[in-house]
Image: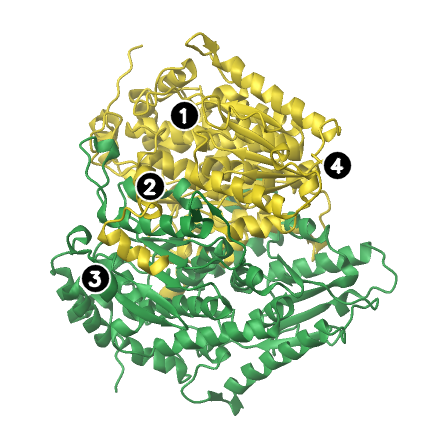
Chain colours: A yellow, B green
Amino acid sequence: MSINFTNLDKTESFNQLLTTPLCSIKSELSPERIKKYSANAGAGLVYNFAGKKVNDNILELLQKLADEQQLVEKYKMILNGDVVNTGEKRMVLHHQTRGMKIDDVVADGQNITEFYAGEKQKAFEFAKKVHNKEILGSTGKPFDTVVQVGIGGSDLGPRAIYLALRNYAKPVMNAHFIANVDPDDANNILQHLDFETTLFVLVSKSGTTQETLTNQKFVIEKMNQANISGLNPLKHFISVTSATSPLASDSNYLSSFFIDDNIGGRFSSSSAVGACILSLSLGPEIFERFLNGAKEADKIALNTNIFENAALVDALIGVYENNILKMTNTAVIPYSESMTRFPAHLQQLDMESNGKSVNRFGEQVNYSTGPSIFGEPGTNSQHSFFQYIHQATSIIPVQFIGFRNPQIDADLEYQGSTSGKKLNANLVAQMTAMGLGKDDTNKNKNFAGERPTSLLHADKLTPEIMGAILAHFENKVMFQGFTWNINSFDQEGVQLGKVLANKVLNNEMDDILASYASIMI
Amino acid sequence: MSINFTNLDKTESFNQLLTTPLCSIKSELSPERIKKYSANAGAGLVYNFAGKKVNDNILELLQKLADEQQLVEKYKMILNGDVVNTGEKRMVLHHQTRGMKIDDVVADGQNITEFYAGEKQKAFEFAKKVHNKEILGSTGKPFDTVVQVGIGGSDLGPRAIYLALRNYAKPVMNAHFIANVDPDDANNILQHLDFETTLFVLVSKSGTTQETLTNQKFVIEKMNQANISGLNPLKHFISVTSATSPLASDSNYLSSFFIDDNIGGRFSSSSAVGACILSLSLGPEIFERFLNGAKEADKIALNTNIFENAALVDALIGVYENNILKMTNTAVIPYSESMTRFPAHLQQLDMESNGKSVNRFGEQVNYSTGPSIFGEPGTNSQHSFFQYIHQATSIIPVQFIGFRNPQIDADLEYQGSTSGKKLNANLVAQMTAMGLGKDDTNKNKNFAGERPTSLLHADKLTPEIMGAILAHFENKVMFQGFTWNINSFDQEGVQLGKVLANKVLNNEMDDILASYASIMI
């Protein structure tokens, strides 16, 4: 099949959608629809979109849009190792890190699929040796704590996953994360640590990330200041980096693990970036199960029928909301305290991938691209910004995530229901209220309804489900980028700030920069 | 002066703004402007708005809008104890909790100003007795840990403030927070506690909040299950509630502290809701300093000149961005890891207050009201969603917050600069990059600039500055609500969800609710 790259507004289906009558949730929501508008997301995860402002007519056109934009074919290009990240001339290989492939990807004589698998095994072996006390701290004590030193994709995804699974997995080692160059971040964490039993994971693909290298030196200096006899700071560090980075050649580290330029930071949770910290903290078995769940979701994403491909239909409805309904925000609300930092990961994943104004050929596009993403757990968010969702002048579609059972098997009943049941009663109440609203002659108490909602649901937040959720959103973002005809895999917009920050630090400021700097420095 | 309540689109100044030429940040940003576009926010906090898309012309009309909408006069109505929350027929008295007043507010023969001051003193005395070991746990051990059990305004503000100041204040007692009805939240915290030395603060104004009462019973049951000889759970609880609530009459608690209906949850951080947990954890002196800072900001907010009133000019520029420039989102980015949860507090404060579609008379408004708010600390956010801020198709104004010095005096130098200097170099670099952009013939590397930014800055994040920041945003939200002619102090939009959740729990579901419930319960 020949592949075409076409702007959204040049497609026939999009132009048909522009003139298709809108759907009313209030008119169309029914038990039948709640049953029918549901798609498999893999590993037991299911996506329900009955609360979306779409009907069979619109979905038919979205299916046509998927076909016209060859979304699944383009996903296969990624799996095949095509250079889909055209701006940076790179492949996009994060799926390979969980074993999702069509064939092994081989480039310049290297089997990259095997390379990733090998690094994962290395991470597993290393974690087992640490757990078995075969690898000890430099003063001879076993490690009981692990600290990830990294920022952006080296922080948000692994941190969100650790928090999501620590109650399920019962950590082998406690994990902490140092990301910000704000010295209060590192100091706050370091002051509670026993350096002799702490292992640091230094994560920087380029080996040049300013914040991360600064924090590494900060940690080393604090270890030296602690004046512990026999303590050798570098022997408490492993590095995760690319084979060509300055960090890779340093044999002073306890060990090094590798990724490569074909995995973007925000897609790196299933690579060595996540494998080291999560295997050390949660155990290799848990991380393997997480990868299996992600792979299951990746497989589902190959289906061309939107009713059988959760990531695809989620992506297309998102485009419809953005470009037809002009709703450019999305709230992600997990009814699970364990997923408290997952929305922050999604902010990076989605907004850094699809917050673009040019298509893959570098031409300005004439339509809105990626949504703005935020979220907090429910029910907390009900007592915070849900007033806005129900009654504000702007409409924000809500992506709910929920589980039938809690992770910790220690729930209690009060007034006839468990906490978990109350949690989920609130979740379904919110979905119903947002869609249907409620008329009241007192306009202050009136609910207009017609707020789009969807629900990703599973039986329990297990490692497999967490993997499937991660992959679902990665694949959704990928499909949306293809629909908009943009490159979701570069991030040129982060460069200018870095350049200007270095000008400040090197005292090469023009007058504006100097004026602002005089306030802050 | 007679007070008029007028919709924004009926004001002369707004209609003049609609036809006033836009400002170009690139053309107008200069060192002079950076110096001039700055307003005192109180207690050493300063608001710089040089990076906003406004010029002298536009600011003159915004001043006119402030005068026409009588914003400062309406603030004085609040201070005077007028029934400004018309929907619920309540006064709006959170300013009184930090001693900000014109005269004492007296209603039904009660001096409410003195009532709040008395409850604060009670909280201080209680905290001192706990710290001095005059008040002990039921098994005779001193308390070393305090846990707030509350949700929404009883959680977000106090939690954000605790995290913001714990590195500065060196906590007397460690604090934890249980908010979510998700049992994994309570279980995760309770499993690490020593019940004998833990004090719980139960916070519910109405005394009927489902999540909070459920969590209280959850805690008590877990304490009973622990089978500790002599442990009396209720003697490890204090309550913060209204004098008329079911909780207030229960003498089994260790003590009770009171607020009243004139303080909304999202404005309650400076009342007993914050006073108990923060005095216990950080000490009464720290909380008093926090209140003093808030009061200083409240005083500044009385100035009618927008160049001398940071909250007022911030509010008006926000309205301009929302209703003229059609930018309906705001990102709040503190370059301070300690403020990591402050954006979540602001989400509630702003979105629950001004996420409304009807004016104070219950009539539909024809313009956009409150913005959608989200944020994460910098520099972390640079490595996450700042790509979107710089290059997306939608423009999101950024509210930066920064401090010249870190809280913990233990910074280190690396490659010629401290971590703190690198942090702030990045902050000013981002402000410059967003405003000025950078032309590039490669459109993928082009930065259009014209992204509005502002900066709240101070020397250090002290208790006074945290108080001033809190009050700044409270007052900004208040001024915006008055500008839009809406009631910022009720939250009718949260009611429908509560009703439907109870229908689920009582098995009184209609078919839609039942269909959704069958998925989740």
Q: Is residue A400 visible?
A: no
Contact, CB < 8 Å: mark 2 with mark 3? no
Q: Which mark is residue A141?
A: 4
Q: What separation in Å lies between label 1 and label 4 (alpha carbons)?
A: 54 Å
| Badge 1 amino acid | Ile
Q: Which mark is residue A306?
A: 1
SS assignment at label 3:
helix
Disc 4 crowd rating (10 Å Cα; few below 14, some 14-19, many 20+) is: few
| Badge 4 amino acid | Lys
Q: What separation in Å lies between label 3 and label 1 (alpha carbons)?
A: 54 Å
Q: Mark 1 or mark 4: which comes first in sequence?
A: 4
Horizontal and vertical percent position of residue A94: 47, 23
Disc 2 crowd rating (10 Å Cα; few below 14, some 14-19, many 20+) is: many
Direction from residue B84 to residue A139 in the image, left or right = right
Quarter-of-image position of residue B283: bottom right
**Circle 2 is placed at which residue position?**
B388
Q: Which mark is residue B33?
A: 3
Q: Is residue A229 visible?
A: yes
Quarter-of-image position of residue B206: bottom right
